[in-house]
Each structure stands twice: as C-alpha cells, then as structure tokens.
Image (cartoon, helix red, strand yellow):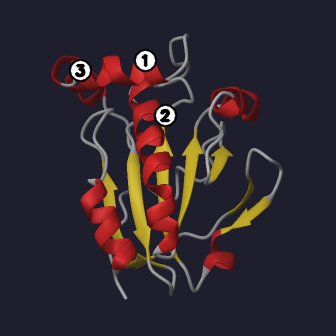
C-alpha cells in the first residue's frame, strides 16, 4: 500500500553494505531521502545512482542524508560500487524487508513503458553500469521518499516506469528548505 504524505515514515533497522548499522529513527533531526531500486545491475538504477552521486555534495551541504536500497544481495551491491564508490549509504535488501512497509510497487506495464519510451536513458545507464542483465523481478518500480527532521514523509514518489524518479529539482528544493 502506498504511503500518502504527510505520514510517519516506517522505521527500520538494517545494515548497510559495509556492515554499519542503520536505523531510520537514529536520523531524526535530519532530512532524509530514501531511494528504492530494483537491482544493482539495472541500467536505469545505475543512471539514477550516478546522478545522486554527482549531486550528493550539494545535498549533504544542505543537510540531506541519502540512503539507497537495492533488491540485490550484499555482494552484488558491493561489486556495483567497487569501480565507483558512492558517497551515501547503500543497503542490500534481497528479502525486500524495507520495500514492503514503503509500498514499493510492481508493474509489467511500467517495465515495458520504460523500454519503449526511455531508450536513450536506458543506453546511458548501460554505459555507466554493469555488464550483466539485472536479476530478479523486472517489474519492480523505483520509488523516492523525502522525510523531514521529525520523521514524516513529506514527499512519496512512486515511479511510473523503471526510469521514473523524483526530479532532482524537488530533491534540491527539499534539501534547501529551512
């Protein structure tokens, strides 16, 4: 079930890919962006992670923490970042324990729509990412959540296709908000 904002963000406790404990509740007092991805080898995911990496210094300077989730296993995500370490927290969640409470959706139509409408973005993502095809459920859609200092989801964005993410202009506007 989708989260409608404003709503208290579902708390979670996980380990990131470096075995560091991460609990959403421990980030109270900070603004947080949670991004959910399909697979570490997904070209659309690779492109978005690349965009977040390029924007992270500015976002962090404004006080925004970024946490990304992948349905892939820990080893796959570590291989993904081995060539280009990422400046934000990455979480492998192959059992999708955190995906459920955030209402992450599946859509075969969304997968097909992305393949037809976003071919240039797909090709750019392939150039930036892995050399293998993504594993697992190809219909898992991306989602982004902006969470305020009190732990409330202020923006829940559910992708309509594999390459559809919250516009970076909205992310920057949220990060700059005082």
- Counting from the top left corner in percent of width and height, residue 17 is at 75, 44
How far apart, in angstroms, are the residues tagged by discs 2 and 1?
Answer: 18 Å
**Where is the C terminus found, in terms of image quarters?**
bottom left
Q: Earlier in the sequence, mark 1 or mark 3?
A: 3
Q: Is residue 114 left or right of residue 176?
A: left
Query: Circle 2 is placed at which residue position?
Result: 38
Q: Are marks 2 and 3 in contact (CB under 8 Å)?
A: no
Residue 109: image location, x then y, percent? 23, 26
Residue 158 locus on image (x, y percent): 31, 51
| Residue occupying the far right of the picture | 19
Q: Residue 120 has which mark?
A: 3
> Given this view, does label 2 or label 3 mark the residue nearer the observer?
3
Of 50 and 73, nearer the camera is 50
- Look at mark 1 in the image and give the residue it sits on: 127
For residue 144, what is the image quadrant?
bottom left
As displayed, is residue 98 above or below residue 109?
below
Residue lying farthest left?
117
Q: Residue at x 39, y 42 (%)?
A: 142
Say what secondary structure mark 3 lies in. Answer: helix
25, 48: nearer the viewer: 48
Quick one: label 1, few (<14), some, or many (20+) residues within 10 Å?
few
Residue 20 lies in quadrant: bottom right
Which residue is drawn at the image coordinates 53% and 30% (left, top)? 39
- Of callouts 2 and 3, the N-terminal one: 2
Q: Number of marks in the image? A: 3
Q: Nearer the viewer, residue 18 or 99?
A: 18
């Amino acid at each position: 079930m989708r989260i409608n904002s404003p709503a208290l963000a579902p708390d979670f406790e996980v380990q990131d890919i470096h075995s560091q404990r991460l609990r959403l509740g421990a980030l109270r007092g900070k603004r947080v962006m949670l991004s959910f991805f399909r697979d570490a080898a997904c070209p659309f995911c690779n492109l978005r992670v690349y965009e977040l990496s390029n924007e992270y210094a500015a976002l962090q300077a404004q006080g925004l923490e970024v946490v990304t989730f992948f349905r892939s296993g820990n080893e796959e995500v570590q291989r993904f970042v081995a060539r280009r370490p990422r400046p934000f927290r990455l979480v492998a969640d192959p059992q999708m324990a955190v995906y459920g409470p955030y209402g992450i959706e599946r859509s075969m139509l969304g997968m097909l729509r992305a393949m037809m409408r976003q071919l240039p973005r797909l090709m750019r993502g392939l150039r930036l990412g892995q050399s293998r095809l993504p594993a697992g459920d190809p219909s898992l859609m991306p989602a982004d959540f902006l969470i305020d200092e009190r732990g409330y989801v202020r923006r829940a964005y559910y992708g309509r296709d594999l390459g559809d993410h919250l516009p970076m202009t909205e992310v920057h506007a949220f990060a700059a908000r005082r």
